[in-house]
Amino acid sequence: MASTARVEFEEDFQALLNYIERSGRGVDISEVRGKMERVHKKVTQLIAGSWLSNTPEEVEIEQALQGKDSDTIKSVFKKYGADLDCFGSVNVEINENNSSGSFQERSEQIPTLTLPYPPRPESVMDSQLRTWTNNDDPATIHPPAYIPACTV
């Protein structure tokens, strides 16, 4: 899954770059990539934390994801360090049946960012999730294979 996550990340990165270029904003590819990587990592960490639901923050994130309201999800994620509108306004959808997210432009509509939110794998221990949620190594971008991959 990790290699699949990287491929999907690259595909959605290109789609995002195309969207930004069409919006008329200047594009610094390295800046966009860096920001996208940071947001991508943070979103996967928030999803992993929501599976733990041990802190008030994790419970709030879990409730936002389960509620599936785009504005609520964006607000809660921004509060905890993942600004989903950092490249322009997006509509957020939740997919509980997939382990990877996507970024899609739909003609004359706000682009849609689909976040993966499958059930927590039974074989994943709390300590594994906590290791990922606490990972602050900037060189580590993609989550372990048992964490849903998200593209932003």
Image (cartoon, rainbow, N blue to C red):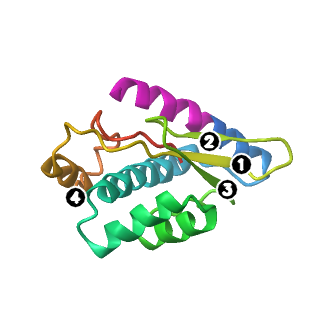
36 relative to 44 in the view: left or right: right
The residue under label 4 is 134
Residue at x-position 28% and y-position 44%: 140
- Mark 1 to mark 4: distance in Å? 30 Å
- Mark 1 to mark 2: distance in Å? 7 Å
Q: Residues within 10 Å of mark 4 (few under 14, many from 20)?
A: few
Q: Main secondary structure of the magenta part?
A: helix
The residue under label 3 is 90
Residue 4 colored in magenta in the image: yes
- Mark 4 to mark 3: distance in Å? 27 Å
- Asked if the residue under mark 3 is in contact with the one under mark 1, i.e. CB atoms within 8 Å, the reply is yes
Vertical placement of residue 123 versus 66, above or below? above
Q: Residues within 10 Å of mark 3 (few under 14, many from 20)?
A: many
- Magenta residue span: 1-14
The residue under label 1 is 111
Please tell me which of labels 1 and 4 falls first in the chain.
1
In the rendered image, the quadrant that contains the N terminus is top left
The answer to which of 121 and 128 lies nearer the viewer is 121
Q: Residues within 10 Å of mark 1 (few under 14, many from 20)?
A: some
The residue under label 2 is 103
